[in-house]
Amino acid sequence: MLENANRLKLETGLSQSSPTTLPGWHGLVLHSTRSGSNSVAVKVFDNVVIKFGEDTISSLGRDETAYRAEIQRLSDWCADNNLDLNMTKTKELVVDFRRRTSELHCVSINGECVERVSSFNFMDVHIATELQWSSNTLAVFKKAQQCLYFLRIHRKMDLKKELLIVFDHCSVESDYVERVSSFKFLGTHISVDLSWSTNTSALVKKAQQRLHFLSVLRWNRLQTDVLVSFYCATIESVLEHAIPVWYAGIVFNISYLRYIVLMTNLSVASEPETRHKINLDDTLDFGVRTSVQTSTSWKAPIIWDGMFDPNLYDQRHTEEKSSVALTVFAVGRYLDAYLKTFLTSAEQHFMVGLPVTYYVFTDSPEKVPNITLGSHRNIKVIPVEKHTRWQDISMMRMRTISEAIESEIRHRFRYVFCFDVDQEFKGRFGSEALGDSVALLHAHFYKLPQAQFTYDRNPKSKAFMETGDFYYHAAIFGGLWQNVKDLVDACYLGIIEDKLNNVEALWHDESHLNKYFWIHKPSKLLSPEYCWDQSIWDKQGIVVTRLVWAPKHYDTLRSG
C-alpha cells in the first residue's frame, strides 16, 4: 500500500501478525515487504535477517534491552527506507518458562504499544505461549467440524459414496498434515523403511531420460570423445550422486543400475557386437509397492504400477522386434455388445509401438466392425462354429486357439495374448506384461484367503484342486507361443476327458487354467490393475486400472 506515492506500508505478522518473543528468543516476521518491484532484505547490525519468498524473519538476541533497542533500530530503518510498519498486524508473543516472572512492559513502536497475544497462526499452525498443541488441535478440529456439516448435507442428498469420499479427502482430510512414504532431501530420496529403492529408482529414471539424448547424439555420428564427455557431465554425475552412502544398501536395483551403465556403453561404443543381454525383470523395483505382494514364492514378479520403467521395456522389445498376436472370441450377441469397444480401446493402449495382429474368432464374420488401425497393426477374422451353450463356447476356445497357433501364429509372432471380449482398455497395457508364461490375478480373489478360492473341488474332474498358490482369471493369459500352446492343449485335453466322464468343471476353462498354472508355474503374474472390476468397492492397492470389465448382461447375452 503506497503512502504519498513514495512510502510503502510494511505488512508485518505471522499469518497477518508478527511475533516478537521474550525471553528465550525474539523473532519478527515481515510479510509483503516490497518497495516498488524489489523485495526488501533486512540486516540490522549483528542480527541475521532471513528472507523466504515474501516473509522476512529477524532473529534477535536474548537481552530484553537489546531486544527493545533492536525493534527501535528496525523502526528507524523502515523510516529511512520509506516504509511504515502496520501496527494493526504487528503482535507480540511472550514465551516465559521462568519460575519467577516479572511484569513486562509493552513494546512501543513510534509511540504505539504492540498488542500482546497468547497465540498466533503461522502457516496454518497455531503456536501458543505455553508451546503446547492444544490450540492448534482445537483450531483444526473446528475447521474439520465445519466441513463435516456440508458432508452430512451431501449425504442426506443421497450423493454417491465416491463423491462423498472425494469431498472428505479435499475438504476434511486436507486440514491434516500429510503423511508421506518418502521425501526428497538435498537430492536424496528418503523412505519410511529406510531402504534405498526409492532413491535408486529416481536416479535411474533420471539417468534413463538423459540416456535418450546420448543415443540421439550417437545416431548423429558424433565422435566418441564427445559422447564420453556428455556421459560424464549428464549421466555419470547423476548415478554417482552420494553413491558411497546408498550403494551398499540397495538390493533390488543393482541389476537396474548395471543395465543403465551397460546401455550407456552401448550408446558410446561403435561396434554392435558389444551388445549384451540382461533380463528386464531384474530391473523391477520390488520395494516400491510395500502394501501389496510383488513376487511369488518361486520368485516370479507380480507386476504393479510403479515397479517398472515403461521406456526401458519398450526400448528393449522394439530392438528385439517383438511381435504379439491377440486372440479374442466374439460369438453371438457378444460381437454386437463388446467387440468394437474392445478393439478401439486396444488400439489406443495395447502394446503401442509393437506389431500386433488381432485374431477375431466369430460366428458372424460379416458383422466385425471396421477399425482404424495404426502401422504394423492388423485384424484377421476367423470363422468358428456356433455352439448352443455358452459354456461350450468358453471351453472350446482352447482347441481353437491351439489350432490357430499351430497353423499360423507360430510362424509370425513371438508372443500370444488371449483376452475375453467383454473388456475395455483404459490405460497402458504394454510390453512390461510380456513374458515366457503370463497369468492374471483375479480381481475378486487376490485379497482373499486361499480357503475362499473357487477351485474345482470335485475329485472326478481333471481340474480338481485341493490347494493352490493364487486364483487366476481366464480373461487374460499369454506368453511365448510355445508356452501358450502347451497351456491350451492341456486345458483342452482336460475338458475332453471330463466330457467323456460326464463331468463339467466348476468354472469351465478357468478351472482347468488354474490347475495348469498350479502345476506349471507362470513366469510372470499381472496384478488386478491389468483387469479390474469397477463394481469392487475396495480399491486399496489399485493405483491405475489398465483394463476394466464391461457391464455384464448375462440374461440377454447368453443362451443355454
Image (cartoon, helix red, strand yellow):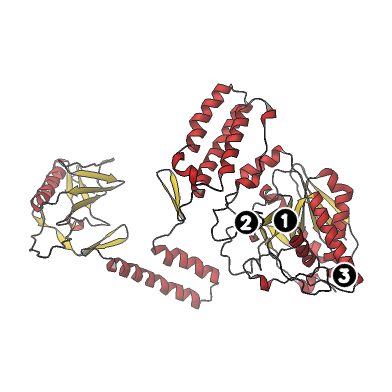
What numbered label is drawn on residue 522?
Answer: 1
Depth check: give the residue in front, 309 or 292.
292
At 68% from the left and 47% from the top, the residue drawn is: 431
- Residue 156 lies, in percent from the top left, at 49, 78
477 over 216 or under it: above or below: below
In this rendering, is residue 261 above or below 290?
above
Residue type at mark 1 is Pro
Q: Label 1 to label 3, Cα distance in Å?
A: 24 Å
Looking at the picture, how far across and down is residue 12, in whole percent? 22, 52
Sequence-first tag of 2 and 1: 2
What residue sits right under mark 3 in the picture?
Answer: 498
What number is the disc on residue 20? Answer: none
Query: Mark 3 packing: few (<14 Cα in 10 Å), some, or many (20+)?
Result: some
Q: Position of residue 380 (x, y in %)?
A: 84, 50
* Quadrant containing the C terminus in the rendered view: bottom right
Kindly identify the residue that appears in the image at 75 percent across and 57 percent down. 477
Q: Earlier in the sequence, mark 2 or mark 3?
A: 2
**Which element is circle 3 on?**
helix
Q: Secondary structure at mark 1?
A: loop
Residue shown at 86% from the left, 55% from the top? 402
Q: For this rendering, which residue is in front, 538 or 272?
A: 272
For label 2, the crowd category at 10 Å Cα-Cα, with few meaning under 14, some 14 to 19 and many 20 or more, is some
The x and y percentages for residue 445 are: 66, 68
Q: Amino acid at mark 3?
A: Asp
**Which mark, by number, is residue 295?**
2
Contact? badges 2 and 1 (CB < 8 Å): no
* Marks 1,3: beta carbons within 8 A: no
